[in-house]
Amino acid sequence: MEAKKRVALMGTVIELQVAHPKADSLLQETVRRLEDYEHRFSANKKDSMLGQVNQAAGKHPVQVDEDLFDLIALAKEVSLSTHLAFNLAIGPLVQLWRIGFEDAHVPDPKDIQCQIQKVDPKAVLLREEEHQVYLKKEGMAIDLGAIAKGYFADQIIAFWKGQGAMYGLINLGGNVRVMGDSPKSEDGSWQIGIQKPGQRRGELIGKVRVKDKSVVTSGIYERKLCVQGRTYHHIFDSKTGYPLTSDMTSLTVISGRSVNGENWTTALFHYSAKEAIFRLDKQEGLEGLAINQTGEIFFSKGLRGNE
Ligand code: ADP
Ligand code: MG
């Protein structure tokens, strides 16, 4: 039996579709888990588990659940790799600009300079045995907004597989992961739509066909702030304190694990669309496409020829 559900959570609409003898109750439990994740992993809620880590910055370490610890550890590792834009300690800048919220604004350059001092991933101290996280400087804050949804997608798919689901799809607002054979195609592949930058949801530039994969898209067209003819989006440069600048408007990564695809979409966002795909081509097991401001589309090796 197949069941579908749409739930508003994590600032987006989450779509769920799963085939299982008890699909309805499986989806109920899935929603419960997603609510629990939101409650623990959100950087926007002071009383979340991550919120407690951030509140204790410069004061004391905080013990967290194993899953949150693992995701922070992974995010730290990615943040420390060079030449990549991803930084888990980006919280102070996200909170200063507030892009995507009603009170978004272009901050005073002095405030930006002040926040930059606090976005150092090396100052995120981890104690593996105790699952403790300590942010060394006061005012520091971890933000997992760039990868948490991918992590949740992976966890939910693993849960469904463990429960013996036949097939399924989870879409957390542009983060899609599928398992099993799609009931809609002969070869079992799933067609995942890629949104047209700047258009409303549902307008597509095309579709990719995948099986047992994740398709993650990061775009600068949904959450942005326009002031005096300039547009500011929501992925920040840790060095300048301003949004990253490149000609890219949208980057899609196809990967096995969704958390990995999320890492890469954010990590490559400071490169031009062409350069981002060039770099993606060097990574084994990853495919993707990037769109620049003039609407040009660049495809990774495995997608070329299927345009
Ligand atoms: P979306 O939320 O549109 O799916 P992304 O997956 O690209 O977007 O993640 C953007 C979010 O990541 C921002 O809203 C913010 O919470 C966080 N973020 C912003 N800049 C960075 C950065 N340089 N490194 C890591 N996370 C970032
Ligand atoms: Mg991301």
Image (cartoon, rainbow, N blue to C red):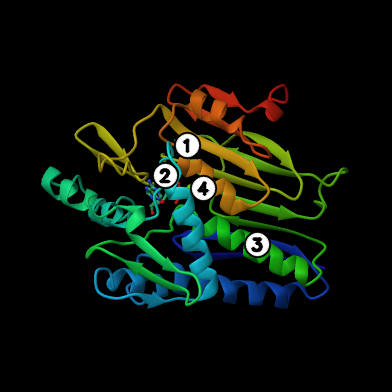
Q: Residues within 10 Å of mark 1 (few under 14, many from 20)?
A: many
Residue that mark 2 sits on = 222
Question: Callout 3: 10 Å neighbours few (<14), some, many (20+)?
Answer: some
Asked if disc 3 is less than 8 Å from ligand 1, the answer is: no
Residue for point 26% across, 40% down: 242
Residue 268 — which label? 1
Residue underneath mark 3: 16
On whether ligand 1 comes within 8 Å of the CB at mark 2, the answer is yes
Q: Earlier in the sequence, mark 2 or mark 3?
A: 3
Q: Three-letter amino acid code at disc 3?
A: Leu
Q: Give the amino acid at mark 2.
A: Glu
Looking at the image, is mark 1 or mark 2 earlier in the sequence? Answer: 2
Residue 263 badge: 4
1 or 65, which lies in front?
65
Residue 59 position in % (x across, y down) = 25, 74
Residues under labels 2 and 3: Cα distance? 22 Å
